[in-house]
Image: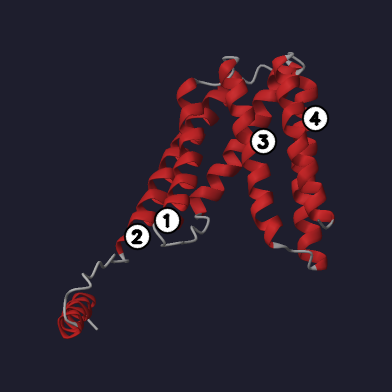
Amino acid sequence: MNIPNIITVFRIFLVPVVVWLIISGQLQWAFFVFALAGLTDALDGYLAKRFGWTTVLGAYLDPLADKLLLVSIYIVLGLADHLPVWLVIAVVSRDLLIVGAVLLSWIVGRPLELRPLLISKANTACQIVLAALVLVDLGLALGWDALTRQLIWITGTLTILSAALYLNTWLRQMSEFEIEVEPASRPSYERDRDKSRRRRAKEQATGS
């Protein structure tokens, strides 16, 4: 537990604080705590890269803290009717889809790493901006309803496209693996012959 990981854990503890502030109607304070969480996210990332304090725990803990914060805020804002239900469902379903795909890959013995896509980064940025915009608009009564509606549709579109691209990437990577079940009773020369045939067919298909 180095300094960046401690800061990340602190950000996780801010999640129930933000949720409580939104539920209790203290939206201005909820925005300030949300902004504080964003600052801690930038700080732990800077410290980890600047001083080489990167750890395996931090690689998993940092995105987990970010997702817990965003998903919790979207669910609470959706329940309070400050965000449309379809957007909340899209945001939560996308994250569940990614987590489920990675877990399934590990279960079947085909672990893989889904790298962040450009559209995924844009989607995350829009989700953060939208959450901050809704909180500050409601907390300070700025009347930014038109801007909020536009950003809702942009965020929803990026969320759906990001989920579709991640699913396509996962399916393409999984299809590259062939699960072979060879009966023990078959002679070894038959298994070797079938493997050679499959290898030649794959080489012909890829043009090699």
Quadrant assignment, res 29: top right
The N terminus: image quadrant: bottom right
Gap in Å between the C-alphas at discs 1 and 2?
Answer: 8 Å
Of labels 2 and 3, the one closer to you: 2
Quadrant assignment, res 190: bottom left
**First along the sequence among labels 2 and 4:** 4
Residue position for label 1: 105
* Classed neighbour count for the residue bearing mark 4: other residues with Cα under 10 Å, few (<14), some (14–19), many (≥20): some
Of labels 1 and 2, the one closer to you: 1
Image location of residue 205, percent across then percent down: 19, 75
Give 175 or 144, whichever is nearer the viewer: 175
Image location of residue 174, percent across then percent down: 35, 60
* Classed neighbour count for the residue bearing mark 2: other residues with Cα under 10 Å, few (<14), some (14–19), many (≥20): some
Residue position for label 2: 174
Residue at image point 43% right, 44% down: 163
Residue type at mark 4: give it: Phe
Residue at image point 55% right, 47% down: 122
Residue at image point 19% right, 79% down: 191
Residue 27 in the figure: left or right of residue 205? right
Residue 32: which numbered mark, if any? 4
Residue at image point 64% right, 28% down: 73
**First along the sequence among labels 1 and 2:** 1
